[in-house]
Structures are given as C-alpha cells and as structure tokens.
Image (tube, rainbow, N blue to C red):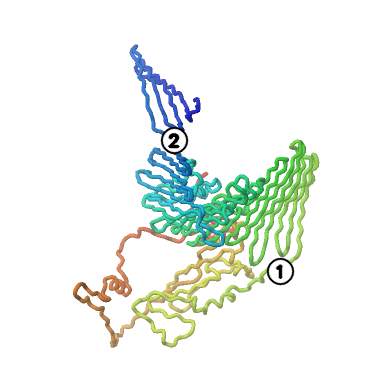
Amino acid sequence: MTDSTNSSGMSTDIVLVVDVRTGHDNRLDVELGAEMGIDFSGGPPGVTVTVEHMVLKSTVALKFSSGRLRLLPQVQAHPPTGARVSLDLGGVTAGGYLRHRNEPPIDEWLGAIAADLGPVEVTGLFIIGRVDRIPSFLAVLGARFAPGIQIGFGFEVTGVGGLIGVNRTANTDLMRERLAGGAVGNVLFCEDPVKNAPTILDDLSHFFPSAQGRVIVGPTFQLSWIKPIIRADAGILIELPGPAKIIIIGSLRVLIGANENAALLFLRMDFVGEVDLQRQLVSLDAQLVNSHALQIFRLTGGMALRMYYGPDPYVLLTIGGFHPRFDPGPLTLPAVPRVGAALEAPVGAFLRLEMYTAFTPNTLQAGAHVQAGMRLGPLSADGYFDFDTLITFKPFTFDVEFAAGFAVRVFGRSLASVDVSGRLTGPGPLVIHARASVKILLVRVCGSATFTLGSRNGDSVTAIPSVIDAIAGELPKPENLVASGGDRAVRLRTDVARPANRALLYPSGTLKWTQRRVPLGVDIQRLENAPLAGTGHRLSVVPVPGTPAPVFESAREWFSPASFSSCDSSELMNNAGFEQLPGGITFTAPAVATSGDARDSNLNIRVVKLPRKLLIPGGTFRGYGVPGLVEALWESTFTPAVAAQDRAVRVSIETFVVLAPGGVVSATEDSSVQARLCSQRSGGVAIAASDVAVAL
C-alpha cells in the first residue's frame, strides 16, 4: 500500500490485490487488482469541498484454459463515504457534512450542519434511515447566541435547542461507560460539529440506538455564569410511551484563565442522570474529563448515586469509589475512579493523591492513598501512605486499615526501606494491631504487636433481656390494626360506643396486624441495634388454645437485617440494606355457624333511582345517568366475575436452603437472612433453592 499527497489537497491510498485460482479442468485464473482511495479537498475562494474516501477499483482477470489466454479488464467506481462543505463569505461562515452508512442491517444517512451568523450560531445533527428494516429518525438542534439572555445574579442563557428521536431509545449504560472520554458532553453543544461530525454522529447512533415503538424527546439548554467562568450544557429527555425514562445528560465546565489549555483551573464534569420508571431506579453518574490545575496537576474522579424504590429498596452514594472489600454486585454500577490529583514534574519529582467516600444503607466508607517521590540521577526516594475506613453506627464502631512506607533506591534496587501496616478497631476496647519491617541492604528485620486500650465501649448499648417485653407496646396500638374485605356496599356504624383499641370488622372480612420493629419467624440477635441477652430469640404468633383456629397468613414489612442480626463488616457492605420479612399476620375468622331456626325480620330499604334521560330540543340531557357513572356504581357494589382459566404468570416467594458441610440440605427457609443465620450455626452455606449444581 502506498500513500501520496499533492499540493491540490488530494491524498490517495493504493492497495494491490493478487488472486490465483485453479479449476478442475486444468484452468488457471489469475486476477490482478488495484484499489485507490481518494480524499479530495478544494474549491473556489470562500468555498471548501472535501470528499472522503472515494474508491476506484480496477481489476484485470487472466483466464488460461485449453491453450487459450483471455484478458478481462474491469473498472469500478464507488461513491465517497462522506462529503463536507465549508463556506466563509465575509463574516458569515457555514458548513455541512453528509455520510451514507450501509452496513447491514444498518442503512442510514448521517449529517451535520452549522452556520455562524454573528450574534447567533445554529447547529444541527441528524440520522435518518433503517435499522433491521425499522425506519428511524434522530435529530439534535441547537442555537447559541451572544450576548445571552440575562436571568439574574450573573446567570445567562447562552443556548437553547432540543433532541427528538422516533423509533429510538436511550442507551444510558453505554453513556456511563463513555463518560471519561467526554463523548456524552459533546453531543449537545459541540464546538465544531461539521469538523467533528464523524465522531459525534457515531456517538449519537450508539447512545440512541434504534428501538421500534419508542420516541425520545426533550429540550436542551446552555447556561453560563460570569462567562466564561462557569458553563453548563444539559438536556432533559423523556422516553415515550410511558414515560419509560426521564434522562438528564450534559457537561459542567469551570474555567479560570484564557482558555482550556492555558488555564489556572479547568474542571469539566460530564454527567448522566436517569429516572427509570420501569426498573424503579434513580441514578446519577458523573466523571471529570481532561481537568487540570495550575497547568501541572492532572485532576481525576467520579461519583455515582443509586436510589432503588422497588422491592428490596436501597440508597447508595459514592464519590471516588468504594472500600476494597465492597462488591457492588447487582447494583449496575460502572467503575468509579478515585478523586485525586497527580503531579509529574520535569525535575523528576512526582506526587499522587487519591480519595474516596461512600454511603450505603449500612455503612460509611472512606479512604485515601498518597504517594510521593523524587529521582536524582541513579538515586531515588519514594514513600506512600494508605488507609481504608469502615464506620457503622448505633452502636458506633470503626475499622481502619492503614499502611505506610519509605524507600531509598540506587539504580532501581532498594538500599534501605521501612514499611508499617496495621489495623485499628474500636471503641471498647480499642485494639491496634501493627506490623513493621526495616530493610538495610540485604538485611530485613520484621515484627508485629497488638495493643488493647480500654475495656468497655462508652457508646455500647445494654443487652435487652426479653424481646417480648420490649415490643409489648406494639400490641395495643390502634394504627397497627387494619380491617379490610367484606361487602363494600355495607357501611358499619361508627357512632356506636365500642371498646378502645378495636377495629370494626365485617364478619367475612380480614384483619391485619403488623409492626415494623422486629420480624417474625426469624432468629433475632439484636433489637434496633441493641444486643439481646441469651440466645434463641424468635417471635411467632399462635392461636389461643381452646378457640376456633382462624386462617393465618403472614403480613410482610421491610426490615434492615443489620438491626436484628449480628453482621461483620463484609456482610454489612455487601448484603441488601432491607429485606421483606414477616412483620405481622392477616387472618380471617372461622366460618360463622348457622342456626337451624329461621326467623323473619322486617327491613326498611330506601331505593334511589338514577335519573332518566331527558329529551330536550337540540340534544339529550343525560343527567347522572351517563354510562360511565352507571358502570362505576355497579362495579363498586358487586364483585366482577372472573373467568376460570389457567394463570399466565405465577409468582412465588423465593426460598433458600442451607447446605451442611457434606452438601446435604439441612434447612429450608423463605428468607435469605434466616438462611444465613442457620448456616452460621451449622457451619454450612446458604444458597437460593433455585440454584442448580454444576459438575466441574
């Protein structure tokens, strides 16, 4: 392959192809070919036309068969993959870009336009075509103006626009993965959309892929404060029908200096926020992009927020990542880089600082890493300091792991070094375990020690002797009793004196009693983070002996496992913050016995009829007798009939099994917390009952 460029703005790529084939009848086919890709740029004054990769393919086939030689020349021309036009007409500049992409199953036209009219700059990006035979359309329009529209306190609106996509959806997972590269922040208000069109249009097609029946639409805007110190580009997008998603994407920039490259401080943070109504998840992700300070410090970092409000809810926030022992697992979190600064000085010195803070339903996590060093010829010295902290509350405890060291090297080999590491836990007592080593030349001396300070935790909670006595006050609370069911057309009288702390119940209805302090049917080791005296605590509800047994069903509520079970630091970080467990009962009274004696009773019934339709000149007056109201009244009085047929979907509570050390199932539980507690007692392992064994 050869490349050549001349003064006219033309560049060529030539590829030679040789293909030799032999046939069954001693026929020899030789094909010589050349492909030439041409990029052309030129035009009259004020107009520049650029043609991207127009291909000319020339082939000569030599066919030798039965003593005869034939030459078959052929020349083919393929249209360019893209074309760009730029105009500069004395104060007014404009341009456009167009490309056709035919990569089955994708057949699309991608384009960009831009025009600078002085006070207003207009840009547009569009993608139109078919993907998997589904027609789709996507457009991003924007207009920036100077000066902007003042809205007070130094803020001004400097740009407005919008995004619309038909048969398109938003791939927010890919947006999160591409945050660090700045692709998300460039698709709304790009500085030069025509010049950067190939990259931006490819990003758009991946961020908003084809999806039949989906529409995504929303406004975009650019907001500045004391321009150019702070600038925010953002778009609020809604995915329909539904709405299924509400998405906020954009970029926040802080600039102190003339421009990004020569700034005393430049911060750019791209972000993606999403409210997924189908997954019941609220998320926000952000990362620093190409940020620096004083032209010598490189700034990095990211953050993530997750708030799930469906079954097993949780809230999670991290700035710079997590504790090394924390595994986010199914929380759909991308890698969150540490928040830090790095200095690489030309004199051979370096400095790196990284930090993180994270909040989960059970813990507070924080940590840092500092490393510095200097090199002078063959001699170098460097040191480091690390710590990772895990804090729990009520009772207050902390667990800190730390490490530090310093080394002097000659020609990359250690001359002398000191390393210290350890762990600090507390309070009550405060335990310090430390390890240290000193190396000089080839001699290393190591040692370790453990220190215990204090004997009691001042913040410790006194053990509770009886869990029944502690929650006895939940039994008489009226708000814990809820009556439901029965005939909705019958209203029980509330003006009749009745005993306190009682609920009115229809004879064929149900009564529900729940409380949210401690779960039922589960081993309890703590009550609201306070320890329980003794072992074997478990609450259950049983009928009073000698009374007709009602029909019991458990009523579930949300509980935090850390509030009633003892968890170590790893379990606090990795287990779910809340789990749905039995918190009460729902029961129906036994069937009412009927007497053989029949008694007559006189009932006074008041019948209220709906008004009839009244015919009046020019129309019909329906009054209250509209069909919708009649149907609503009918359905509120009678139970609708349900056709007898097989259920299309069956939902059941997930169960868990406890495997003994030999692999035998020793217990079956409907709660992951209870299964874990049983496995701790037996020394086995708790797994979901639906897990399938795999032979390795």
Left or right of residue 323, residue 485 in this image:
left
- The residue lying toward the viewer, choosing from 287 and 257, is 257
Q: How far from the left and from the top, in percent, is residue 582?
A: 50, 68
Residue 502 horizontal side relative to residue 68, left or right = right
Q: Which residue is mark 1?
A: 458
User: Eyeballing the image, is 357 above or below 587?
Assistant: above
The amino acid beneath tag 2 is Val
Q: Amino acid at mark 1?
A: Gly
| Quarter of image, res 44 | top left
Q: Secondary structure at mark 1?
A: loop
Residue at 38% from the left image edge and 52% from the top image edge: 214
Q: Position of residue 692 (x, y in %)?
A: 48, 50
Q: Position of residue 1 (x, y in %)?
A: 49, 25
Say whether disc 2 or disc 1 marks the residue closer to the N-terminus: 2
Report the front residue among 666 and 238: 238
Total residue callouts: 2
Residue located beneath label 2 in the image: 49
Note whether residue 332 is visible.
no
